[in-house]
Amino acid sequence: MPPTDGDDIPDFEALCCDGETFRSTHLSEAVGDRGAVLVSTGFVYSAIAQNWWKRFQKYGWDDFEDVPVLGISRDGPYAQNDFLRWLGRPPFRMFADVNGEVSEALDLLTDRDHMANVATPWRSVFVVDPDLTVQFAYVADEWIGPLPHEDVETAVAEL
């Protein structure tokens, strides 16, 4: 079962991309002084990911104080860095979850009927405090549904 409010997110380690470089990073090293917003959108250049991440910029999520927005994507670091540059280099960063180990640890992976032998994570967002305790959790139950951005923004404000 994916993490819910009050659960702890595992302190995973994966390549963290910033649009230029990537290096192996623990989640605990990437969170800000107040916490972080973790977003899983599957693959970076999917239509949903493009839509969501552009909306995050419109919502002003790139200006959260001491609360970085961190993506989790099944793409490799070069694709993620290219995607971050495509977004116009906001301060977002992304973890490369190429083998799905992070998504599996968060219990987000699901088989896709039309994608043989491929498991993708459910679209989700978690607001965590500096101790990696979930303060807000949303896991979509459909592939194209909108993200409850106002709930995320409220949770960030309460960190």
Image (tube, rainbow, N blue to C red):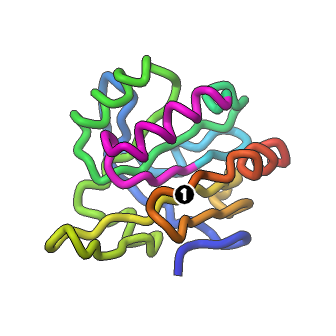
x 44%, y 70%: residue:
108
On the image, which quarter does residue 136 sit in? Answer: bottom right
| Residue type, numbered disc 1 | Gly
Residue 1 placement (x, y as % from top left): 52, 82
Residue 71 placement (x, y as % from top left): 46, 45
Please name the residue that numbered disc 1 is placed on.
145
Residue 137 placement (x, y as % from top left): 65, 63
The front one of 30 and 44 is 44
Task: Say left or right for 71 vs 9.
Answer: left
On the image, which quarter does residue 57 sit in? Answer: top right
Magenta span covers which residues?
Answer: 38-59
x 30%, y 27%: residue:
21
* 42 part of magenta stretch: yes
Look at the picture and state if 86 lies above or below 130: above
Other residues around mark 1 within 10 Å, as few (<14) / some (14–19) / many (≥20)? few
Q: Secondary structure at mark 1?
A: loop
x 37%, y 71%: residue:
109
Look at the picture and state if 51 lies above or below 159: above
Look at the picture and state if 84 lies above or below 144: above
